[in-house]
Every structure is written in structure tokens, then in C-alpha cells.
Image (cartoon, grey):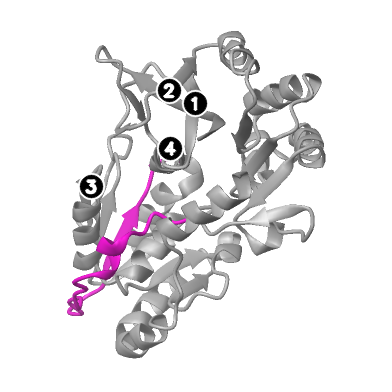
Amino acid sequence: MKELVIISNESVSKNQLNEFKSANLDLKILPDELSKFFNVDCIFRRSKKELNHQFKTKNIYAGSTIFSYLFGVIKTIFKKRTYLIVSISPYTFLSFILLFTLRKKRVFVYLMSNGYEEYEYILGKKFIWIYDLMFKFITKFSYVIVCHERLYEPKKSYLVSPSRLNSRWTKNKTLPKLDKPRLLYVGRINPEKGIENCIIQFNEINIDAEMSIAGKTEKLENFGNKIIPLGYISSDEDLIQAYDRCNITILPSYTEAHPYVLEESLSRNRPVIIFEEIAYVKKNKKGIFVIKRNLKEIKETIYKIIKNYNSIQEEMHQNDLPTKKRMLEQFSNILK
């Protein structure tokens, strides 16, 4: 098999059994599944915290500093390899500069978003030029893989359809209870995810409803009696049950790349509410409602969905959702 090196800005932990784990399930999927097609080596940042998702692939190097991280990249240059850089950051940018200087030609960069929205949120508009410089340099001198039509440029990039869906997600679907709105949030408890503000707004709405939170909720305070913390959910089976117990999924993020929550919810025939800041993730999918971030629209949209639930579900049957199998075939064909 051909040699593939995956370079990512994400962090992984290592325990005494030499097991590597990630907080990001998406990070784990690519190396584990692409190992079926390539001999995969991975270079990540080192986390001091014990994380959740254990890798199957064993060839992982984790650098605790920028210097040890780049040393991991240097160790890979002595064989003919294909490189896949996942997202653009200072760490991956310096890795690319190193590969570019050494005239490594088979370098791909995988962009789940253009990154500008995320870095503007992190750095502010005043310093977005830093990311702009990194983005333009890397995309000019590499093969670009994207997952959004809005980023796709024929003859300049490759388009893939990211997905975590396997056959379990489309089997044994259940009809939800519609006695009252039962919302579900799935994701990290980070500021850019908007969940804290969403909880505040939800508690202010005069409505008989509940919202379940699937994620590490230790950072959150003052839930209110309408909020049900489920904790972190690691298995597909438990996550499917969480979707099935709700009748609406909500994604209150201020910025997103490719949220798998959409496909997961739609695969279980559950409509999704998102806000206008991330309207671009809707694409042509049925069952996704884009609204303004105010109490009036949230309340009206919740009632609208419950009232028209059957017809909305009929529309959702038209969705052609991507699968993990299709995604991996696309990646394999591009990288080969």
C-alpha cells in the first residue's frame, strides 16, 4: 500500500498503555478508515488531558511543542509519501512551509470550511490578514480537497461529502412523541457553538418544552428545569437513541465547517433548527429551518415544526444523505 501522512492541528492524548485518544470524533475517522487503503502515519499536537475517542491506527506522533511537532514532520520526509494536511492553522502552515521547502509535491490540504469565519471569531477582523496569508499560500501550492460547493473550484480543487453515517443510522427508525417540543443539542460546550446563549433564550420562552444536551456540561451553570443534561455520548447506539427521544434538533453555532449533526438528525427523520449565521450548511437539504436568533422566531419555528411534523417528515424522505463509505471512497480515489 502507498504511504500517507496525515498532519492535523488537533490534539490527542496518550495514556500509559500507549493508546492515543482524540476529543474530536471526526479526527479519528480519517486515519482509522483510510488505513484500509494506505499505510497511515499521523502527526498531531499533544494534549495533557485524557480524551475520549481511541484510535485504531497505531502510527501516531504527538508533539507537545511546535518544535517537537515539526520534528515529527521531518521524520517522515525520507520516504516517498503523500501528505494530507487537515485544516489551516499556524502549526499546519509551518508544516506545509517545511514540505514546500523540501519540494514535496504530493501534498493535499483538506478544508471543511474556508476558515475565515472561525478565525475572525477567534482573532477579530483586525488580525484576519494572518489567516488570509496562510490560506492563500497553502491553497496556491497544494491540491485542495473541500466539502462545500461554495469552496469548490473546478480544475483547482476536489469535492468530497463528509459523513459519519453507516447502516445503523438508517435502520429501525421510530416516530417521535409530539405531545410537546423535545429539543436536542449535540456537540461541544464551546463559546462558538452558541449553546450557552441558546439555553438562556430557551428558558426565557414561555413554552411547555424541554431541551436535552448531549455533551460535557460541566462548564454550564443554571440549567433551569427545562434543560436535561445527558452528558457526553460516545457510541452510535446511544446517540441514535438520543435523537429518537427528541422531535427537533437545534444547532445554535455562530460558525460551523461541516456539522455532522445535520445528517445524523435527518437520517433519523428529525427536523433541525439552525441560525442565519450558518445558513450555508443547509445546502439543498429538506427539514432544516434557518431562523434569526431571537425569542419570537425560535418559539414560532418550534410550533410550526410540531404542527406540520408529518408533512416535514415526508419532505425529508427526499434527502440523499452522504455516507461514510462514500466519503472514504472519494478520499481514496483522490489521494491515489
CA neighbours of label 4 inside 10 A, class few (<14), some (14 to 19), many (20+): some
SS at mark 3? loop
Q: Secondary structure at mark 1?
A: strand
Residue type beneath disc 1: Asp
Q: Amino acid at mark 4?
A: Ser
Earlier in the chain: of badge 1 and badge 2, it is 1
**Residue bearing the label numbered 4:** 35
Tell me residue 335's x, y (percent): 61, 44
Residue at 41%, 38% (x, y): give it: 24
Examine the rendered structure and indicate whether residue 70 appears above or below residue 196: above
Which quarter shows the C terminus?
top right
Q: Nearer the viewer, mark 3 or mark 1?
A: 1
Neighbor class of circle 1 (other Cα within 10 Å; few <14, some 14-19, many 20+) is many
Q: Identify the secondary structure beneath mark 2.
A: loop
The residue to which callout 3 is attached is 235
Residue shown at 36% from the left, 90% from the top: 311
Disc 2 and disc 3: Cα gap in Å? 24 Å
For the residues labelled 1 and 2, the Cα–Cα distance comes to 5 Å
How far apart are the alpha carbons under marks 3 and 4?
21 Å
Mark 2 or mark 3: which is in front? 2
Nearest the camera: 131 or 72? 72
Residue 179 among those drawn in magenta = yes
